[in-house]
Amino acid sequence: MKVMEKHVKSIFSSTKLDSDFVVNPYTGCMHNCIYCYARFMRKYSGHNEPWGSFVDVKINAPELIKIDKKYADKSILISSVTDPYQPLENKYKLTRKILEKLITLRPNLQIITKSDLVLRDIDLLKKFKNCEVAISLSCLDERINKQLEPLASSPGKRINVLKQLHENSIKTALFISPIFPVLSDWEELIKRTKLSVDEYWFENLNLYSFIRNNVYNFLRKSDPDLIKTYNQIYFKKNDYWKIVEQKIKDFCAKEKIIGRIYFHHN
């Protein structure tokens, strides 16, 4: 793992996501998820190394957060193209230091992570009037999950995070993403977490050209019989994802749970 400490000029970025601004304490991510769409960041970071083998630490990021009405009372997302609680956060504590600075700005705060390290910062999260932590999880199977997300926390640990946050009155979301055909049992994930989750987000697996080989290599090793199924879903005309989306909507309505769908249909 190539780790470089870097000074940056700004830490707030505007975004087209459901927030006014996004904060990414790191560039790159140790979790090395095989489906990670953030690989596109390589062309901006100047790295030749494979995605998942480098992390740039924005060492001065906390210092860049000032009391500024431009950012006060806005919605801020941590983070969009890295995991703010990846293993390096244990050492650098950048995310924690950023949270300490953000408290005075009174933002509507959202955090997305695959790590149980977020529990370390419960004391700070409780100081935000509006705070939501989304735990991203694709699959309950420990073996499969280890292949998909090598250094992320186990499914069991992530489910426990939701429970602990809920018990501390911190709003929670389970981001079931990406949904892998056949492998991701989104209904079981909901059943296992319903008592600890305020809302669910759903995103299907999008086979971008730059992750396609990774996914198919995974299928060859894990379950080669699924290759034919994936070829049918992704390269033949069909309504597979429209059907799944409708099933999710019907299930959420039946169970009276909040579900937000972020499906790609191209």
Image (tube, rainbow, N blue to C red):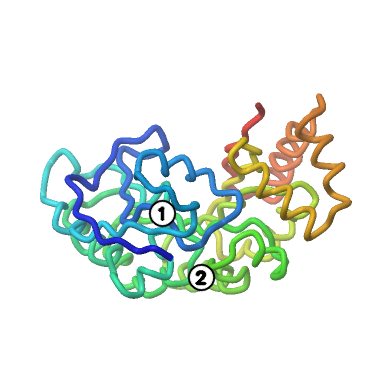
Type of the residue with mark 1: Gly
The picture places residue 37, in percent across and down from the top left corner, at: 53, 43
Horizontally, is 42 left or right of 211 in the view?
Answer: left
Horizontally, is 239 left or right of 21 in the view?
Answer: right
SS type, badge 2: helix
| Residue 131 image-quadrant placement | bottom left
Which label's residue is closer to the chain start, 2 or 1?
1
Q: Which residue is mark 2?
A: 161
- Residue at (57% x, 41% y) in the render: 260
* Label 1 crowd (10 A; few <14 / some 14-19 / many >=20): many
SS type, badge 1: loop
Question: Between tags 2 and 1, which lies in front?
Answer: 1
- Residue 28 is tagged as 1
Asked if disc 2 and disc 1 are in contact, CB closer than 8 Å, the reply is no
The picture places residue 145, in percent across and down from the top left corner, at: 66, 64
The one nearer the camera, 196 or 6, is: 6
